[in-house]
Amino acid sequence: MISSEKETSVSGASDDLVSRATQSLAATPVTIVLDTLTVHPGASSWVQSGQHLHEGTDTCIFCGAPLTEERRFQIEQHFSNEVANRQGGFRALASDLRTLVVDADSVASRIPNRGLLFDDLREGFDSAAAQLRGELTALKTWAAELQERVNAKAANVLAAVSLRSYPCPL
């Protein structure tokens, strides 16, 4: 069983993650939406990753079409600082969720072997250890599902992402 001090710490950390994720997933940066990304929103991360490849050229290296100054300006406006800031926030949140999964694995690996206990303590230990393992598995599943949504939003900050409730299982 987790001590009440640790429980408060875990609860506070998970509340922070839930709050950050809910606010981040609901937010959409103010930006100019490229006409082609309105039609093909899945191409957003592809266009952004190719943006730096087109510096110093007047022709699109992917399709061969002319790359005018107006089009460059539109792309820069679409991927503004606000977009970059939001993506940085998503990366930080995803990193925190990955850390939570690693920490849960670490806690699970430190559950002692029942053979180290006196016989009369094993039955109670088995029950508590099984409960803790179940809670850690639920926490890892919760973090993985939330991280999947965070990563989807980071790939395209303008896309709608499911905002179902994310109560932490602990």
Image (tube, grey):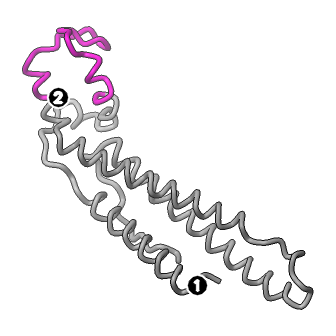
Find disc 1 in the rendering and name its residue.
3
Residue at left offset 29%, top offset 11%:
61
Q: Could you say where residue 157 lies in the image, as x and y percent from the top left? A: 27, 46
Residue at left offset 41%, top offset 48%:
151
Q: Which residues are magenta?
A: 47-75
Residue 95 vs residue 78: left or right?
right
Element type at mark 2:
helix
Image quarter hosting the N terminus: bottom right
Q: CA distance from mark 2 to mark 1?
A: 52 Å
The one of 16 and 40 positioned closer to us in this rendering:
16
**What amino acid is at disc 1?**
Ser
Q: Could you say where residue 154 lies in the image, as x and y percent from the top left? A: 34, 45
Residue 72 part of the magenta-drawn span: yes
Q: Are marks 2 and 1 in contact (CB under 8 Å)?
A: no
Considering every residue shown, the one lying at the far right of the view is 119
Residue 21 vs residue 111: left or right?
left
Residue 111 vs residue 34: left or right?
right
The one of 144 and 103 positioned closer to us in this rendering:
103
Q: Could you say where residue 143 lies in the image, as x and y percent from the top left? A: 50, 61
Residue 86 part of the magenta-drawn span: no
Find disc 2 in the rendering and name its residue.
75
**What amino acid is at disc 2?**
Ile
